[in-house]
Image (cartoon, helix red, strand yellow):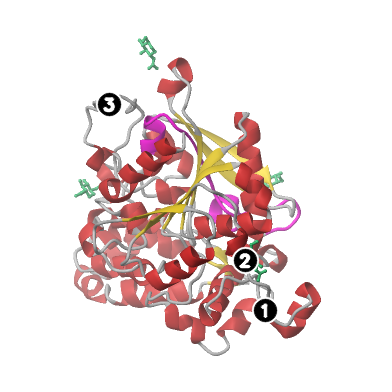
């Protein structure tokens, strides 16, 4: 079962209907051709590139790894290799960069055109990092780190399983971020440690890429020994106070049941993505309406959003997930808690021996090197929820709040000022733990 539901609906309303004016004025033939007239050149060549194609387009070497979780999901991990370091230098430290909800490795790789493989380790770097340093993986690799970028289960690059077919078997989609906590995160960590022959790695997560580490550190505290540091960009554990406009969806009667039965995929139809990633969304008027899909999900910050690159963000910015993942966040939102998956009273009794799903006890986390990079304006990582998270943590942690007052959820990936606001301090914190 595929749910094109919500996101699709919002997208249609915001992008396509508003596009009717230009469609009518430009003639139907042109519109029909638009889907095939994909942008290939200029600064927008990043649209339609896979993670490895993106990495290679910046002259890095991309090594693709596939790792199988204990429950059979086959996850792709892209390893960024800087040719400068393979021959002459050793890298400083291994870093895993993990995307959030509706994301993939691509999320980190498309913010700006630049970031070519080179060496930015010197004290005097002859490059404008405010412009060239906007893509975290290229920045970190050029700064001497060994960068690995996993794709969590369900997204198009990790849409595979040892014996379930995601196109046919509903069972494939019966997962939420709980299974990413229990299986994906530890599998990725152990695999990368083994490949690199290390005892520890740095984990940098965005949004759900932080949820799964908070959960893991509670569930399997032995992973504290393997993570140093954990840098949480736009941390998400409690979600009771999110203010994004998609919030009311959690209250739609019957939606929970619809999302829970069988489990299904949430995705955008491919033709719609192709259309959006074509020249279509770059037209004046239409570009703003195409961008509204991101504003709806991630909050509004038109000033730092490069509308010229809208086709790249639409194409690379949306990867499918399971309806259960959304449902899990919706339950935690409605109940203002960070709990395990809710199967309803009977299902919960069977699975957990209690009517309600057990909560993740964040006070049990014993990792001492956590850095929270936050923004007061982030609608999905709200200050009230952050306060609950911070109060729950009994270990010391560093918090860095970005100075730019309107910094929003997706700005951690795609803002024009992301280097000065987030990545520059992030590199400083990394050094602190080297
Ligand atoms: C916005 O994106 C376009 C296309 O990639 C690029 O040419 C331009 O320099 C970017 N603008 C800013 C302010 O970064
Ligand atoms: C390796 O170092 C040598 C000598 O310092 C230099 O000529 C060469 O360009 C370096 N190779 C790379 C790939 O940076
Ligand atoms: C999916 O995973 C299986 C098992 O690891 C593998 O044999 C197969 O080649 C993979 N398929 C794709 C399309 O990657
Ligand atoms: C949570 O963990 C802390 C620290 O281990 C412990 O003191 C506390 O009792 C736990 N709370 C619950 C509800 O289990």
Highlighted magenta segment, given as a residue range:
138-165
Q: Quadrant of the N terminus?
A: bottom right
Q: Distance between the residues labelled 3 and 1?
A: 56 Å
Residue indicated by mark 3: 123
Side of 6 where 184 appears, left or right: right
Quick one: 162 or 119, which is closer to the camera? 119
Q: Position of residue 148 (x, y in %)?
A: 52, 39
- Is residue 160 something one can see in this rendering? no
Question: Please, what secondary structure does the residue beneath circle 2 have?
Answer: loop
Question: Please, what secondary structure does the residue beneath circle 1 have?
Answer: loop
Side of 288 where 12 appears, left or right: right
Packing grade of label 3 (10 A; few <14, some 14-19, many >=20) is few
The residue that appears at 61% across and 31% down in the rendered structure is 198
For label 2, being within 8 Å of ligand 4 is answered yes
Q: Where is residue 173 in the image (x, y as percent from the top left)?
A: 65, 65
Discs 1/2, front: 2
Discs 3/2, front: 2
Packing grade of label 1 (10 A; few <14, some 14-19, many >=20) is few
- Precedes in sequence: disc 3 or disc 2: 3
Q: Position of residue 412 (x, y in %)?
A: 35, 55
Q: Do the residues labelled 3 and 2 touch (CB within 8 Å)?
A: no
Side of 221 where 308 appears, left or right: left
Q: Quadrant of residue 348?
A: bottom right
- Precedes in sequence: disc 1 or disc 2: 1
- Precedes in sequence: disc 3 or disc 1: 3
Quick one: 204 or 314, which is closer to the camera? 204
In the rendered image, the vertical position of residue 414 relative to residue 58, given as above or below? below
Question: Please, what secondary structure does the residue beneath circle 3 have?
Answer: loop
Residue indicated by mark 2: 361
Residue indicated by mark 1: 261
Q: Position of residue 45 (x, y in %)?
A: 33, 44
């Amino acid at each position: 079962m595929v749910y094109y539901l919500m996101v699709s609906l919002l997208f249609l309303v915001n992008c396509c209907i508003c596009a009717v004016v230009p469609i009518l004025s430009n003639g139907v033939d042109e519109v029909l051709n638009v889907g095939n007239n994909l942008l290939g050149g200029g600064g927008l060549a990043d649209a339609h590139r896979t993670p490895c194609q993106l990495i290679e387009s910046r002259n890095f070497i991309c090594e693709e790894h596939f790792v199988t979780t204990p429950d059979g999901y086959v996850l792709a991990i892209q390893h960024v290799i800087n040719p400068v370091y393979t021959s002459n230098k050793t890298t400083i430290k291994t870093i895993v960069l993990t995307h959030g909800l509706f994301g993939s490795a691509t999320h980190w790789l498309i913010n700006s055109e630049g970031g070519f493989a080179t060496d930015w380790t010197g004290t005097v770097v002859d490059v404008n990092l405010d412009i060239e340093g906007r893509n975290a993986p290229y920045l970190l690799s050029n700064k001497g780190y060994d960068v690995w970028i996993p794709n969590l289960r369900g997204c198009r690059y990790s849409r595979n399983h040892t014996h379930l077919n995601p196109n046919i078997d509903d069972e494939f989609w019966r997962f939420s971020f709980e299974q990413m906590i229990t299986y994906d995160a530890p599998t990725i960590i152990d695999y990368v440690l083994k490949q690199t022959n290390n005892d520890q790695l740095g984990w940098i997560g965005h949004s759900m890429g932080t949820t799964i580490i908070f959960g893991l550190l509670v569930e399997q505290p032995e992973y504290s020994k393997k993570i140093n540091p954990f840098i949480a960009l736009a941390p998400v554990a409690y979600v009771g106070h999110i203010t994004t406009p998609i919030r009311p969806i959690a209250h739609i009667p019957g939606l929970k049941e619809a999302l829970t039965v069988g489990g299904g995929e949430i995705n955008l139809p491919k033709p719609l993505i192709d259309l959006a990633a074509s020249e279509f969304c770059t037209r004046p008027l239409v570009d703003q309406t195409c961008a509204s899909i991101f504003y709806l999900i991630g909050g509004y910050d038109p000033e730092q959003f490069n509308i010229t690159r809208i086709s790249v963000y639409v194409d690379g910015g949306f990867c499918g997930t399971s309806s259960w993942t959304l449902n899990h966040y919706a339950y935690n939102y409605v109940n203002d808690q960070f709990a395990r998956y809710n199967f309803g009273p009977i299902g919960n009794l069977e699975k957990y021996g209690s009517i309600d799903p057990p909560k993740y006890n964040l006070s049990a986390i014993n990792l001492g090197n956590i850095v929270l990079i936050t923004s007061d304006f982030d609608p999905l990582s709200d200050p009230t929820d952050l306060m609950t998270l911070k109060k729950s943590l009994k270990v010391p942690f560093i918090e860095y709040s970005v100075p730019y007052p309107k910094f929003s959820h997706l700005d951690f990936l795609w803002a024009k000022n992301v280097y000065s606001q987030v990545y520059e301090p992030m590199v400083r914190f990394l050094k602190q733990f080297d």
